[in-house]
Image (cartoon, rainbow, N blue to C red):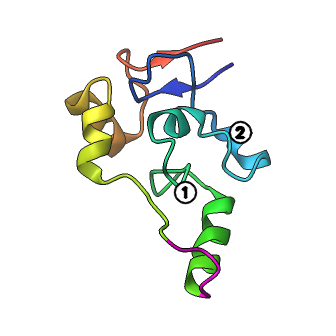
């Protein structure tokens, strides 16, 4: 599978933006493996996750409770290289430290 592996999960899961678009956010697979408790798969503002928006609506009308997402500090602790990834997120350009699989 193609994609980035931002979080250290001990497996081969990857985030794939084009797959996320056609699966309503399920393509953010590395995010899911890193934070399996999270109701949100697209953890960054630019990671579109349509299922998350449905969950937010359900929470607002009382159909969903105890909705969990990871904190920023928890996300930082799970990253392969926190400093490199933080800089990369500013420019959104791939770096050599991020793993790609073809």
- Placement of the N terminus among the 4 image quadrants: top right
Which image quadrant for residue 64? bottom right
- In this figure, which residue is indicated by the disc labeled 2? 18
Q: Is residue 72 left or right of residue 32?
A: left
Near-viewer residue (17 or 49): 49
9 versus 96 height, above or below:
below
User: Of label 2 and label 1, which has the lower sequence position?
Assistant: 2
Query: Which residue: 53% across, 74% down?
Result: 65
What's drawn in magenta, residue-wise? 61-65
- Placement of the C terminus among the 4 image quadrants: top right
Dominant secondary structure (helix, strand or loop) of the stretch shown in magenta: loop
* Crowdedness near tag 2: few (<14), some (14–19) or many (≥20) residues, C-alpha within 10 Å: few
Q: Residue furthest top?
A: 102
- In this figure, which residue is indicated by the disc labeled 1? 39
Query: Which residue: 72% across, 48% down?
Result: 21
Q: Residue furthest left?
A: 83
The reply to whether discs 2 and 1 touch (Cβ–Cβ < 8 Å) is: no
Q: Is residue 7 left or right of residue 57?
A: left
Task: Check if residue 32 falls in the magenta segment.
Answer: no
Near-viewer residue (34 or 91): 34
Query: Which residue: 44% across, 16% down?
Result: 10
Residue 76's disc is none
What is the x, y in percent for residue 27?
Answer: 67, 39
48 versus 11 height, above or below:
below
What is the x, y in percent for residue 90?
Answer: 31, 45
Near-viewer residue (79 or 33): 33
| Residue mark closest to the camera, 2 vs 1 | 1
């Amino acid at each position: 599978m193609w994609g980035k592996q931002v979080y250290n999960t001990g497996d081969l899961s990857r985030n794939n933006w084009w797959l996320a678009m056609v699966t309503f956010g399920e393509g953010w697979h590395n995010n899911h493996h890193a934070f399996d408790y999270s109701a949100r798969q697209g953890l960054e503002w630019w990671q579109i996750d349509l299922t998350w928006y449905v969950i937010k609506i359900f929470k607002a009308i009382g159909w969903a409770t105890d909705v969990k997402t990871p904190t920023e500090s928890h996300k930082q602790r799970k990253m392969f290289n926190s400093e490199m990834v933080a800089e990369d997120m500013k420019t959104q350009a791939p770096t050599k430290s991020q793993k790609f699989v073809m």
